[in-house]
Image (tube, rainbow, N blue to C red):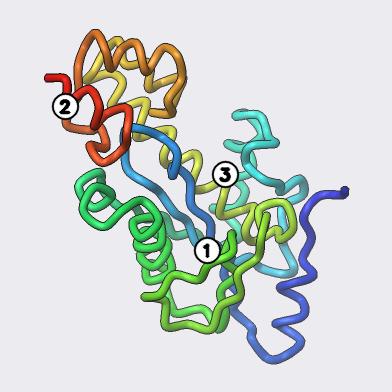
């Protein structure tokens, strides 16, 4: 399987949709921190080489690609908070973050390519859901990179405020170190209370 390409975008552009945004989110699985989404509109003439699903790239490569994207593409990043995640559930919150990322672009795209199998219901722009999109569409790959770097940065900052959480390395995902920190240090204001491991600890208390 080769990496992502510009085929989805080229097809839409050929049909008159000049501004195509790739949209992806990161942070559905963690027990702590926001869920983060990005929307990216690439310039067809200046697509950075090496774009791929952010999980397949080293941190160094991701940072280099984001730096390049900031000079030749339009990038919008947005979040949904822990409170929103607990209030409306993680799927809706991740879709809310996606809607906010698209709304943050300088002008509305003509079409959105959304990673996954669902289109956020609040999105009024024509959209296509692309399963495993971050490995198939360079615009979605670019969005996955921007979202991951933004969220990792937030979790590193929060790790300074809550030493022992390990968020600088686990990004809030339920790693062994995070679960044991949760059990010994307790629940922080940045934990998602609707998530089972956190909920169970709160119930014990």
**Circle nearer the N terminus (1, 3):** 3
Asked which secondary structure carries label 2, the reply is helix
Check the image and report above or below for 193 versus 139.
above
Q: Which residue is tagged 3?
A: 67
Left or right: residue 189 versus residue 17 is left
Residue shown at 35% from the left, 65% from the top? 100
Front in this rendered view, residue 67 or 200: 200
**Horizontal and vertical percent for residue 46?**
72, 62
Check the image and report above or below for 55 versus 51.
above
- Which label number is shown at residue 74? 1
Real-space Cα distance between discs 2 and 1? 45 Å
Asked which secondary structure carries label 1, the reply is strand
Real-space Cα distance between discs 1 and 3? 12 Å
Front in this rendered view, residue 114 or 11: 114
Say few, some or many: other residues with alpha carbon within 10 Å of mark 2 (under 14 / 14 to 19 / 20 or more).
few
Q: Which residue is tagged 2?
A: 203
Q: Nearer the viewer, mark 2 or mark 1?
A: 2
Give the residue furthest to the left. Answer: 205
Residue shown at 31% from the left, 37% from the top? 195
- Where residue 72 sits, quadrant-wise, is bottom right
């Amino acid at each position: 399987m080769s990496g992502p390409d510009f085929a989805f975008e080229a097809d839409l552009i050929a049909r008159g949709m000049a501004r195509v945004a790739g949209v992806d989110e990161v942070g559905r699985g963690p027990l702590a921190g926001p869920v983060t989404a990005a929307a990216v509109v690439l310039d067809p003439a200046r697509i950075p080489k090496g774009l791929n699903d952010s999980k397949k790239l080293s941190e160094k490569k991701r940072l280099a690609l984001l730096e390049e994207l900031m000079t030749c593409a339009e990038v919008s990043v947005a979040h949904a908070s822990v409170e929103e995640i607990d209030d409306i559930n993680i799927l809706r919150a991740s879709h809310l973050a996606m809607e906010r990322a698209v709304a943050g672009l300088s002008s509305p795209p003509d079409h959105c390519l959304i990673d996954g199998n669902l289109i956020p219901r609040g999105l009024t722009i024509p959209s296509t859901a692309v399963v495993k999109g971050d490995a198939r569409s360079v615009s979605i790959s670019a969005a996955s990179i921007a979202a991951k770097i933004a969220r990792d940065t937030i979790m590193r900052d929060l790790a300074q405020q809550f030493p022992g959480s390990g968020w600088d390395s686990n990004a809030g995902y339920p790693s062994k170190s995070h679960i044991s920190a949760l059990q010994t240090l307790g629940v922080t204001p940045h934990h998602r209370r609707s998530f089972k491991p956190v909920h169970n600890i709160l119930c014990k208390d």
